[in-house]
Image (cartoon, grey):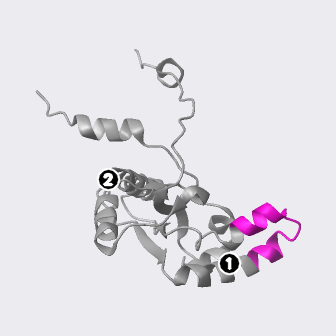
Amino acid sequence: MPITHPDALALLDTRRTIAFQDLAEPGPSDDELRRLIAAAVRVPDHGKLTPWRFVVVRGSARAHLDEKLFALWQTRFPDAPEGKRLQEKTRFSGVPLTVAVISTAAEHVKIPVWEQELSAGAASMNLMLAAHAMGYAAQWLTTWIAYDAEASAILGVKPEEKLAALIPIGTPQVAPVDRPRPAYEIVVTEWSA
């Protein structure tokens, strides 16, 4: 008989995304951040390659990063509406903490790059679930930063790496809202001979 973990299932059933604009202080403490990362790294990692790493943006570094990225963003999107400008100007400083999950996947004799990239995705999801378990909320973003080499470099992403996720974490200021989820019959087929 398998051991069940009803609290874990309840955690999965109740996780919702809260937009980064709706996250506020307090954010995770140093000890909580260590616990979040410890949970994030407990993912499938074929070959024990550790094909991901994390960059934490918090404290006064948030405003400095916003300043650098916003200057670049303005050159990329000069005609953006004012609301989007404000959002980009405070992308990091508007939340207590953001964790960038960086895929370090590389060619390997046995482990496909795709499998390594999936591991970075799993680390991102574990981070979000751990935040939810601690009473925080999070959002998985990539934004323009993931697809702009210069912006990614400002964040610390090396040329051979990819930004898998930006995960802002904080205390939710709004109630979570569920979205429609696909029915079992829509997403599941059974293989048959």
Q: Residue at x 14, y 31 (%)?
A: 2
Disc 2 target residue: 44
Looking at the image, residue 149 sits to the left or right of residue 4; the answer is right
Disc 1 target residue: 69
Residue 49 seen from this side: no
Indicate the secondary structure of the residue bearing disc 1: helix
Q: How many marks?
A: 2
Disc 2: CA contacts within 10 A as few (<14), some (14-19) or many (>=20): some
**Percent x, y of residue 19:** 58, 53
- Residue 151, compared with residue 121, is above or below; it is below
Q: Residue at x 67, y 65 (%)?
A: 147
* Quadrant containing the N terminus in the rendered view: top left
Front in this rendered view, residue 142 or 149: 142
- Residue extent of the magenta highlight: 72-87
Looking at the image, residue 126 sits to the left or right of residue 91; the answer is left
**Percent x, y of residue 140:** 53, 55
Front in this rendered view, residue 190 or 42: 42
**Percent x, y of residue 24:** 51, 63
Q: Give the quarter of the image for residue 15.
A: top left
Inspect the magenta stretch and tell me whether residue 129 lies in it.
no
**Percent x, y of residue 48:** 28, 63
Inspect the magenta stretch and tell me whether residue 81 lies in it.
yes
For the residues labelled 2 and 1, the Cα–Cα distance comes to 33 Å
* Quadrant containing the C terminus in the rendered view: top left
Looking at the image, residue 7 sits to the left or right of residue 83; the answer is left
- Give the amino acid type for the residue marked by disc 2 in the picture: Pro
- Residue 64, compared with residue 136, is above or below; it is below
Indicate the secondary structure of the residue bearing disc 2: loop
